[in-house]
Image (cartoon, rainbow, N blue to C red):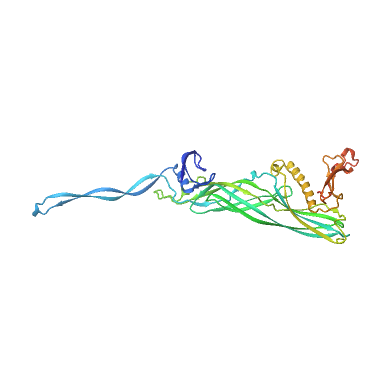
Amino acid sequence: MIRKPVRGVCAGGLMLLLTCYTSATAVGQTLMDAQERINSILASKPLTTKERVTQREETVCVERCSHPKFGGECRDVCKKNWVNVVEVYRDQHRLTAAQAVSVPALEVDKSRLRGLPETAHAQVQEVINCSSTQSTQQLTFTQTAAETVTVTKTQSIKTGASIRTGLSFGIEGWGKGEVGFTVSRDVTITDTGTETNTNTVTRTRSDSKAAPPLSVTVAEFILYESPAELPYSGTIVVDGPLAANLEGKTSLSQVLNEAERTLHVSGVVRISPISHGTLRWRKEKPVTAEDCGEDERGKNIIKNRMMTLAIPVEGRSTFLAGSAQSALSMLRTWDKSYVKDTRKIFSGGTPGAWCYTGPCNSPPDGMREECTFDDEGACTSCYSVSDSVCDPPANNENGGGANNNTGVNNQ
């Protein structure tokens, strides 16, 4: 046990020169003994009256006389005895056993949650309607991912029993909820060290959509992974029996108020939560000869792909806090790249054939991006093309060109 004399507040105590009772643990981690901590606070309170039994040495003498026949001489015969004596004295109250009577759930500082999600787990299904009639497709998406929560305890409280309490928080999401997640687990707050828990989470979503004739529709189910490191804090309210005293006070709560009996715990929770997931339908595009060959005509074809994509670092710091517009711009930039990557996994198009038309440039300048399949059949060969609907307002008699910023397959 290490006793550290300090001046000031000792783990939420009084402004006094007193001794903090802590156990040495790993660097940056402290285990406070609740009983000794409370007794150090009681030392600053008015003394109480107690009694105790002590022993005192006494000399007892008895007169002894000899028989007259032998002269009748008398003398004192003495011996030493130990006798019990009840002593009344003044002393501080002392807690004999610390007991936790209230352990609220831990609080997480979500204001420290910063940054754009780092990873997107995408499941993409491409519905190809090679028939001349509309067809309604029911799609079901299922993804699994590992979700890890690591709790490092920097300040814990030692009591007579192990105590676990809840740590639960969530982010509702941002924008359309793509990054919403929840974290919930129990944490032992009466020891130090690190607790790590990894769970496999499963997210499922179903939806249906009418697929127009001779069209290709892409649906995507995306889970975002958002690592973060957040501080947490909590309290323990203690009570317990007091040492015997003549005032008749038997419990700590008769001497200290709740604030004085409240001890604090803290630590850091590191998370890599998986979002609840979002399902999006991209705008349809017409089928090509490559989509509907002789064998596919008159049929509905569903292609399914899974992929994991990294989201660029730029802009993460403003995603959940700060400039919402900057974060939105960052997401849109990433989303455009993601759309192209999605098309790449369905590669195999005829080199030079159209595969993508982007939105009007911003600000409108009469141009937009268009892409064709490259020599390897991937949708990567992109260039700017002229489009009258993208003309600036001054050059558009109807005045609507600048507002038409919707590209094919790029909602």
Could you say where residue 189 lies in the image, as x and y percent from the top left?
54, 50
Residue 378, percent from left and from top: 81, 50
Describe residue 340's horizontal placement relative to residue 38 as left or right: right
Q: Is residue 228 visible?
A: yes
**Residue 255 can be seen, yes or no:** no
| Outermost residue toward the front in this view | 375
Seen from this angle, which residue lies furthest right? Answer: 397
**Front residue of 296 and 348:** 348
Residue name at image x 76 percent, y 43 percent: 329
So how many labels did they put on this image?
Answer: 0
In-image side of 246 versus 143 (left or right) = left
Q: Position of residue 337 (x, y in %)?
A: 77, 47
The quarter holding residue 186 reads bottom right
Residue 373 placed where, x, y %?
84, 50
**Image quarter of residue 313:** top right
Q: Residue at x 64, y 46 (%)?
A: 110
In the image, is residue 398 above or below residue 99?
above
